[in-house]
Amino acid sequence: MRRRSLASLFAVLLVLAAYAPALAASDGEQQKDTDVRMVDAKVVEVSRRHISIIARSGVEHVIATDAADTHVTLKGKRIDLKKLRVGDMVTVDLDVENPQKFARRIIIGAQSGEVLTAARN
């Protein structure tokens, strides 16, 4: 009887050990940069036609913008593109249909956890 209890406990621990990294990986997937989203990037240059950001990977990206077609939000409210400043932490959603990197949406100050919380609500 004692062997069966120890074997059951060992099996539960083994399942938990295998499940924990898989759970962590699935959470990390939502917070990673992709071809269409840059998460938690730092703005290093702002001009009328483009912004430059440093992604979490350390790679700099130059992304085209347009005041009419790029939606910039701060705390859930839309603001003018010209209010974007060097040093802001941003999440940038790119236009997948555009052959160049073009920002469809820029969220200022949204850390990855905040974006996930907003998406769930």
Image (cartoon, grey):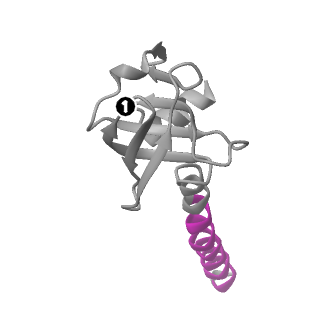
Q: How many marks?
A: 1
> With respect to residue 81, does 54 lie above or below?
below
Magenta residue span: 3-23
Q: Residue at x 38, y 47 (%)?
A: 53
Q: Residue at x 42, y 22 (%)?
A: 81
Image quarter where the C terminus lies is top right
The quarter of the displayed image where residue 120 is located: top right
Magenta stretch secondary structure, dominant: helix
10 Å crowding of disc 1: few (<14), some (14-19), many (20+) = some
Q: Residue 17 colored magenta?
A: yes
47 vs 22, nearest the viewer: 47
- Considering every residue shown, the one lying at the far left of the view is 87
Query: Where in the figure is residue 107, as x and y percent of width and height?
Result: 46, 30
Q: Which residue is mark 1?
A: 109
Q: Residue at x 53, y 53 (%)?
A: 33
Q: Residue at x 69, y 44 (%)?
A: 96
Type of amino acid under label 1: Gly
- Considering every residue shown, the one lying at the far right of the view is 97
Query: Where in the figure is residue 24, as x and y percent of width and height?
Result: 54, 60
- Considering every residue shown, the one lying at the far bottom of the view is 3
> With respect to residue 24, does 88 lie above or below?
above
Query: Where in the figure is residue 45, as x and y percent of width and height?
Result: 31, 41
Image quarter where the N terminus lies is bottom right
Left or right relative to 4: residue 67: left
58 vs 63, nearest the viewer: 63
Q: Residue 52 colored magenta?
A: no
